[in-house]
Image (cartoon, helix red, strand yellow):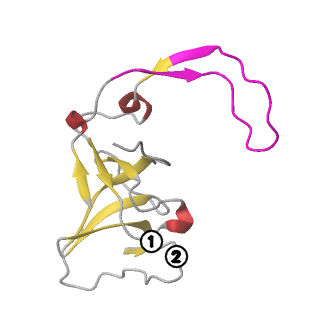
């Protein structure tokens, strides 16, 4: 995983059109701009409590997280059962679903081809933050 500093992101406002796009039959769209948004505002980024990270691997594909997705992570949120988190286990980073049963925790993959991570006594386990959003590029311009 590669951390992306929020300061490296541009703060260029982008127009949000107030018309939903149907994923079924096409319909004419209004050219009405609802408001101008900033990706950092959309993800509620605060420079002291948030960071972006790029995902790799297929272990979270059934949760909609694909390789190269950019995940927005909030360090100020306490993870609860079912949250997707960024964790460091023995200094190796992973993105998984946080599971808590009583006093026990484990990290669940959302792809049956991957094992869940069940920490054992003595392992260094740190939850770095809760994933609150993601951005995905579907097609890149050729340069």
**Point 45% across, 82% down: residue:** 114
Extreme front residue here? 143
- Which quadrant, please, contains the N terminus? bottom left
Which-is-in-front pick, marks 1 and 2? 1
- Which quadrant, please, contains the C terminus? top left
Q: Alpha-carbon distance for marks 1 and 2?
A: 7 Å
How many residues crowd around disc 1 within 10 Å: few (fewer than 14), some, or many (20 or more)? some
How many residues crowd around disc 2 within 10 Å: few (fewer than 14), some, or many (20 or more)? some
Numbered disc 2: secondary structure: loop
Name the chief secondary structure element in magenta. Answer: loop
Q: Does the magenta-highlighted stretch encompass residue 21? A: yes
- Res 76 quadrant in image: top left
Q: How many marks?
A: 2
The residue segment tinted magenta is 12-35
Q: Position of residue 46 (x, y in %)?
A: 28, 33
Residue 90 - label: none
Q: Position of residue 110 (x, y in %)?
A: 51, 72
Given residues 100 and 74, the one toward you in this image is: 74
Numbered disc 1: secondary structure: loop
Q: Earlier in the sequence, mark 1 or mark 2?
A: 1
Q: Does the magenta-highlighted stretch encompass residue 84? A: no
Given residues 142 and 96, the one toward you in this image is: 142
The answer to whether 131 is drawn above or below residue 122 in the figure is above
Residue 111 - label: 2
Pointer 1 residue: 58
**Residues marked 1 and 2 touching at CB (< 8 Å):** yes
Q: Position of residue 15 (x, y in %)?
A: 50, 20
**Point 59% across, 16% down: residue:** 34
**Point 20% across, 80% down: residue:** 123
């Amino acid at each position: 995983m590669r951390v992306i500093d929020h300061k490296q992101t541009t703060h260029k406002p982008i127009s949000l059109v107030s018309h939903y796009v149907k994923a079924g039959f096409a319909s004419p769209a209004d050219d009405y701009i609802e408001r101008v948004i900033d990706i950092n505002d959309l993800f509620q980024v605060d420079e002291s409590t948030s960071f972006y990270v790029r995902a790799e691997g297929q272990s979270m594909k059934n949760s909609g997280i694909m390789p190269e997705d950019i995940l927005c992570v909030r360090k100020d949120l306490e993870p609860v059962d079912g949250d997707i988190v960024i964790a460091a286990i023995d200094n190796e980073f992973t993105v998984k679903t946080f599971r808590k049963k009583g006093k026990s925790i484990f990290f669940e993959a959302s792809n049956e081809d991957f094992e869940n991570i069940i920490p054992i006594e003595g392992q260094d386990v740190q939850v770095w933050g809760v994933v609150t959003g993601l951005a995905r590029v579907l097609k890149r311009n050729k340069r």
